[in-house]
Amino acid sequence: MTKATIKIGGMSCEHCVKAVTNAVRALPGVGKVAVSLQANTADVEYDMDKISLAAIKSAIAEEGYDAP
């Protein structure tokens, strides 16, 4: 599993954290997801053979948050 920390913009509450967590967790190849409202980040463990970091960021963006 590959680990990455993704910066996320636009989160302001626990609902935001849950939305990002659920969106990322639902992706094939994603193992662990830990979203921090205080740090505005998501720590993600994923299988590079099943999903790309760009696809994970895209799923976050589809929820309405910035993931550059």
Image: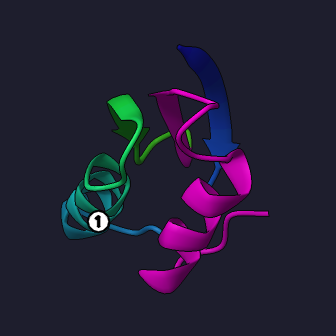
Determine the residue positioned at 40% across, 69% down: 12
Q: Position of residue 7 (x, y in %)?
A: 68, 49
Determine the residue positioned at 62% across, 61% down: 55
Determine the residue positioned at 41% across, 81% down: 63
Q: Which quarter of the picture shows residue 19?
A: bottom left
Residue 34 placement, left or right of 56:
left
- Is 67 in front, or is 38? 67
- Is 37 in front, or is 23? 23
Residue 58 placement, left or right of 15:
right
Residue 17 placement, left or right of 1:
left
Q: Is residue 35 above or below residue 45?
A: below
- Is 42 in front, or is 49? 49
For residue 64: magenta?
yes
User: Hey, what amino acid is under mark 1?
Assistant: Cys
Tell me which segment is drawn in magenta.
40-68
Q: Is residue 10 visible?
A: no
Q: Position of residue 50 (x, y in %)?
A: 53, 40
Residue 48 placement, left or right of 16:
right
Q: Is residue 66 above or below residue 39?
A: below
Q: State the count of labels.
A: 1
Classify mark 1: residues with Cα within 10 Å, few (<14), some (14-19) or many (20+): few
What SS does tag 1 mark?
A: loop
Tag 1 residue = 13
Q: Which quarter of the picture shows residue 54?
A: bottom right
Determine the residue positioned at 49% across, 69% down: 59
Residue at the outermost front position: 49
- The C terminus - image quarter: bottom right
For residue 47: magenta?
yes
